[in-house]
Amino acid sequence: MVDSNACLLLSIVQKLPFRLERSLDWDHIYAQDLAKEMKWHGVDGKQRYQYHPDRKYVWCAGNLWGLDSTINRSFQKIYPSEKLQRLTTLPDPSSGLPSRWPIEGFLSKEENEQLINSETDIRSVNNVVRGMETFRLFAGQRALRIWRTITSMFPDIEGYSNRTTL
């Protein structure tokens, strides 16, 4: 339900206005260009080098957020730790200069830590399996938190979702 309605649900939890003030992109927090590093040699470590099955979470709602288009395009192909750091250094929105928008990224402290830990492990060839487990937890738990926030705001929506998975 969250993945198939990511833009709508993220718009709500990120508190986006109905009429957008600026151009917005749906940014992959862990950049999709970096998904090429999510490789392993299978469960037994003896298979051909291949993409880890949890790589699919790069494209799920738990790894997306709305971000100003100009900023997003200047941040492409950078790791989450660097992206989050750069976001903290942007000018105040009242300055008229390119600034973080929207302010609300709907990323908790725990999710931020999971994201950074997964990046560290994925970038270390010996820890890809642990990194992918942490990344899956990050994306899955954030998607679930998005869903729980939406259902707390609109309780009747749960009746429409009984036939579908998150």
Image (spheres, grey):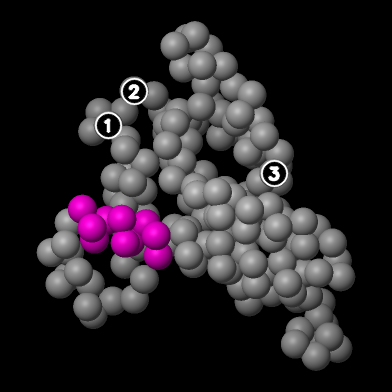
Residue beneath label 3, please?
81
Calculate the distance from the C-alpha at mark 2 to the C-alpha at mark 1. Answer: 8 Å
Q: Is residue 50 left or right of residue 100?
A: right
> Which residue in the structure is indicated by mark 2?
21
Kindly identify the amino acid type of the residue bearing the numbered disc 1.
Answer: Pro
Residue visible at 56% across and 34% down in the picture: 72
| Residue 127 visible at all | yes
Q: Residue at x 69, y 60 (%)?
A: 118
* Percent of width and height locating residue 111: 55, 55
Q: Which residues are magenta?
A: 144-153
Q: In the rendering, at what x and y percent does residue 99 appear?
A: 52, 21
The answer to whether one can see residue 60 in this image is no
Q: Nearer the viewer, residue 102 or 36?
A: 102
User: How many discs mark residues in the rendered view?
Assistant: 3
Q: Quadrant of residue 85?
A: top right
> What kind of element bears circle 2?
loop
User: Which amino acid does the dot numbered 2 rest on?
Assistant: Glu
Q: Is residue 129 left or right of residue 124?
A: left
Rendered view: 47 above or below 100: below
Residue 69 position within the rendered picture, expressed as x and y whole percent measured from the top left: 49, 31
Crowd band around label 2 with a 10 angstrom C-alpha radius: few (<14), some (14–19), many (20+):
few
* Mark 1 surroundings: few (<14), some (14-19) or many (≥20) residues within 10 A: few
Q: Position of residue 26 (x, y in %)?
A: 46, 44
In this rendering, the answer to whether 47 lies above or below 102 is: below
Q: Is residue 150 magenta?
A: yes
The residue at which mark 1 appears reads as 17
State the residue lying farthest toward the top.
Answer: 95
**How far is mark 3 from mark 2, CA to CA?**
27 Å
Amino acid type at image mark 3:
Ser
